[in-house]
Image (cartoon, rainbow, N blue to C red):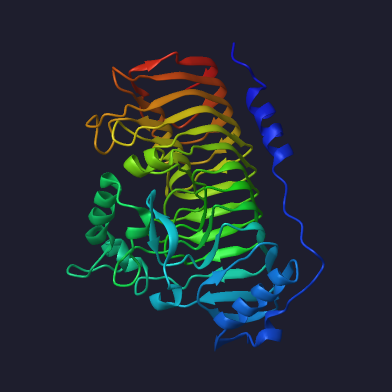
Amino acid sequence: MTDDTAGRRLAEAIRARVAPPGFPDREFPVTRYGARGDGRTDCTAAFRRAIADCHRAGGGHVTVTAGTYATGAVHLLSNVDLHLESGATLAFSRDPAAYLPVVLSRFQGVECYNYSAFVYAHGQENIAVTGSGTLDGQADETHWWPWSGQEEFGWRPGVREQEDDWPALWRQAERGVPVEERVYGDGFRFRPNFIETYHCRNVLIEGVTIVRSPMWEIHPVLCRNVLVQDVTIDSPGPNNDGIDPESCRDVVIRRCDIYAGDDCIAIKSGREADGRRVNVPSENILIEDCDLRHRYGAITLGSDMTGGVRGVVALNCRIGGPGLYFGLYIKTNSVRGGFAENIHLDGITVSHLTKEFLTCDFHRGEGDTGGYPPRVGGIDVRNVTVDSARRALLARGYAHAPISGLHLTDCTFAGIAEADRLEHVLGLVRENVRLP
């Protein structure tokens, strides 16, 4: 018998540590600094001044009243809550120059200097984006999305796209070129993320709606104590992951509704040589009471997981839709390496998946061509109901590095089209699992 309380005990421990930052009861309305919610006036400087004044005063709330505020990059500082009131929309510029100068970022798991995220913070403490307003990235088939190289999203042959630039960054990382020399941004095609907090502590993203992002929506990197709750994401563009904690510790993602153009929640920890250089795992991450509805993995570990992932709990989530592929999707191989351990899913309801409820296939992508065999084990799945999927399980390890310790308890799978596909899996346990 497996321990039926381990996941919930880990969840309680994470909840006890993760708390929202507090802010002084001071308001700094952006309209006081010249911002106008007319959808035309460039409010970038007004946001910058309001945030700077709030920070210098010891913190508080930079408030945005109803209206549409045109802006470029917004950079948060310690002890500042950017608060969008009902009816407030931040409409982010489509001009790439509005996100210069470049800032420290990660692009596909590799550190570099790139366009600023639309909302960005580096090395700050006690920061927040809250309220019931909307963050609109204004990306579409004519702006930002064509850089993906996907014709579905506006790219056309002969137009420069991110895969034209990616090999140069990858080679720099493999050769150990200092991060300060990996400068991209202007003239390159690495799309910025929407919200990125880098090396920050005590981060809160709450209540807002995010639409039309260039790329990933919420991307905390190397952060501690992160709370994302009651957020709505509706952005089905290319590589539009919903929430991607990367090399973070103590994260809670709660009551979020995610309709994304890629993985809904993807837990990451750096990629290949750069992931081994930084070598910081993602750990102690709780996902609870979320709706995950589109497109690839509902809950994904990887594929940039070279630094490893441990201590993940997903509780009482609703998964599924006609465009969603996987429930739990673990992506790695002997090129990426890393590990995934102490993973718990409990109380998951799945309506419809195009592919497997759980997929972990080491042979995906580059196959077994690297020197860093991954370690995947200690995966506990219980109280799961699946109405429709291609398979319950697709798990393919290597003969020299099998997947181990996969336990399913009190699970019901209906509408399964094909039998499980299992290769080099050790210690698979099924207790009270019902299949058609």
- In the visual, does 241 lie left or right of 366? right
Looking at the image, the residue that sits furthest to the left is 158
Residue 56 in picture, x, y percent from top left: 71, 71
Asked if residue 84 can be seen in this view, the reply is: no
Q: In this view, does 165 lie above or below 245?
A: below
Which residue is drawn at the image coordinates 60% and 75% (left, top)? 89
Residue 31 in picture, x, y percent from top left: 69, 84
Q: In which quarter of the image is the N terminus?
A: top right
Residue 247 in picture, x, y percent from top left: 50, 43
**Based on the displayed image, in which of its 4 quarters is residue 87 positioned?**
bottom right
Looking at the image, the residue that sits furthest to the right is 25
Q: In terms of depth relative to the viewer, which is nearer, 295 or 145?
A: 145
Asked if residue 54 can be seen in this view, the reply is: yes
Q: Is residue 356 above or below residue 36?
A: above
Q: In terms of depth relative to the viewer, which is nearer, 194 or 139?
A: 194
- In the visual, does 73 lie left or right of 66? left
Q: In terms of depth relative to the viewer, which is nearer, 362 or 352?
A: 362
Which residue is drawn at the image coordinates 42% and 25% (left, top)? 376
Which residue is drawn at the image coordinates 62% and 57% (left, top)? 231
- In the visual, does 362 lie left or right of 247? left
Residue 130 in picture, x, y percent from top left: 68, 63
